[in-house]
Image: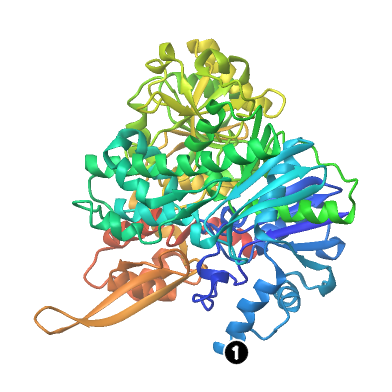
Amino acid sequence: MRILGISGGIDFPHEDGFVTTILNSEVHDASAVLIEDGQVVAAYEEERLNRIKHSGKLPILSIRRCLELGGIRLDDVDKIVFYCEETQFKYETTTHRHKYRQFPYSDPKAWIVERLKQFFDTDFKKENVVFENHHYCHAASAYYMSGFDEALVVTIDGASLEGNAGIVLNAEGNSLKPLSHISNDDSLGAFYTQIIEFLGYTTHDEYKVMGLAPYGDPAKFRRLFKKAFTLFPEGKFRLNRSFYYVLMDSISNPRLKGELFTQEHKDIAASLQEALENVVMHMLTHYQQATGRKKLCMAGGVAHNCTLNGKILYSGLFDEVFVQPAAHDAGNALGGALLQSRKLAPSTQTETLRHLYWGSAIQNNDRVLDILKQWERFVTYRKADHVVETAAKLIAEGAVIGWVQGRSEFGPRALGNRSILADPRPAENKSIINAMVKKREGYRPFAPSILEEYADDYYVLPQTKAPYAYMNFVLKTREDKQELLGAVTHVDGTARIQTVSRETNEKYWHLIDEFRKLTGVPVLLNTSFNNNAEPIVDSEEDAIVSFLTTNINTLIIGDYIIDKKTVGKEEFLKFVPKRPLSSELKQSVGYTAEGSKKTEYGIRLHFGDKYKTALSEEMYRLLELADGEKTLAELVELAGCGNKTEEDVVDELIALWSLRLIYLRPFETVALATV
């Protein structure tokens, strides 16, 4: 039985038409997961392939890649599962069909089939398209992968089409019995997101505030934050929907994006984190006592709050805890597929989660070599006979490397196959990597990857059992190791750890072990391989582009050691620029303060905040002509440089490339594609 789970919206990357509906404006983290007889064959987040962070687009590329890895066609799939209830999906599409004339079908199944047909040239039977409740998908993604026979299952996120922001379930065997629902009005995820606006943040920035919280004192705003919620018996609670305005009247200076943090901002972060923990622990304590369950499964976006997860472990409330690593909406594709699998074949057993390496593979050195040859005007490379030993030596000597091996990870974390790696000991490595790559806030911690055999020597492991392989839990670093691990120990002496098993990632395990032999420390600093404008890299080309637009010292793909060449800007004239399908050029006429007309040029994207990045008029004219075939030199000849020099144009183009607002490819790759 082959089942394809999908999450995300219904628009294609080039479309920008569904912006007023929850089906687009609040849809994020699209994905596709293929399972066969209850086992995962392949899983992708669409952002890794279409290169749109948190992409909510229809996951066409992910579906295609899953089918390729499964060696099947769409016709071979028995069921396609969408991650919300059909009645709610129909309500949204029907509203738009009548109000905006956007949807040609009132039948959601027919609409999905028609959308897929445009890419897969097949009439998938609409009766084989099914819908599953959003939070049951979250719950199934955790419980059915946990290996537990029974558990308390709790999901908490921002909102769902069905009107719930969470659910509490009593699980046993295949049964998921609901105990309680959290309404969208009492959404803990939405509450957290709303409050972080005072700190200059917005949706998808919640994890940043979790990292800021240890710098603050929750006592400073504790009394105020008690007004944010009311706790009732039997694990119930109610959020104060006007608390946003209460806080607005109580703080002196809300932060705007880009401004420095004051101690007040840090104290707000600490109080917010404490408030979340208090409400969740109130719920968990009641339902654990009411059910007697000593095993807990969690999913939903709030389950990515690793500090909260660590508090649950140290509380001792449960004997075992499993948090779905893909707890966000991408994991619902997995959960939906697993739910449908159990419904169609109740005897189906799913293997306990052992790893998340379900994506694209880097396994053919010949393919890597072919790609490197296309970029050889910009990089040098050599094949290493002992790549693990070479990489360990580079890191021990102070290098920051990109490490691309094996199959890519599913979920929001780089777990050693699409990672940036460094020495975890020097505290200054945090600022070095931020300057090199991340360009992010200096307070945010980096995670340690540690050989699982040594975890207890470096971290205070709770008595409650949990899998530490997925960076799901913040744990206490042992006091005698905190100074030693300066680059991966947070200000409060904690770390979001990843244990590495020889069984599930042998090459990464050997790399850390070789570093241990050189330094005596069985730990590496591990952060995701991407800059702050892009998702984690997936392909060899993604890795090369990220390498060239950051200051990472060395890139290692497969067995190849890759370094940058020093090249003149004239070499970039041989690049072929192309705009992403999800972008559009904008020209607007406004006025100056003196009342005279002025024309502004920019490029904007069909997702996220839809902000417009300013362009010079020369770049605007040039990108109008960019067709993915002409080189920059040819475009300059056609469009001219106006008041700019060629060097100015190259500089602006490189800046846009670094922001991933345009694609640049060597002419050689375009030429090969047309042969």
Tell me residue 371's x, y (percent).
59, 47
Residue 140 vs residue 442, the one in the foreground = 140
In the rendered image, the vertical position of residue 344 relative to residue 149, given as above or below: below
Which residue, as the protein is rendered here, is positioned at the far front?
Answer: 233
**Residue placed under numbered mark 1 in the picture:** 98
Whether residue 597 appears in this view of the structure is yes
Check the image and tell me how it is coloured.
rainbow
Please give the name of the residue rendered at 36% of the width and 77% of the height, measured from the top-left corner: 586
Residue 648 falls in image quadrant? bottom left
Residue 409 in the image, given as x and y percentages of width and height: 63, 42
Image location (x, y in percent) of residue 587: 33, 79
How many numbered circles does the render carry? Answer: 1
Q: In this view, does 235 lie above or below 606?
A: above
Quadrant where the image shows the N terminus: bottom right
- Is any atom of residue 44 visible in this view? no
User: Which residue corresponds to the image point at 73% horizontal and 58% vertical from the top-left?
Assistant: 5
Q: What residue sits 30% from the left and 60% below the top?
A: 245
Helix, strand or loop status at disc 1: helix
Viewer-side residue, 301 vs 558? 301
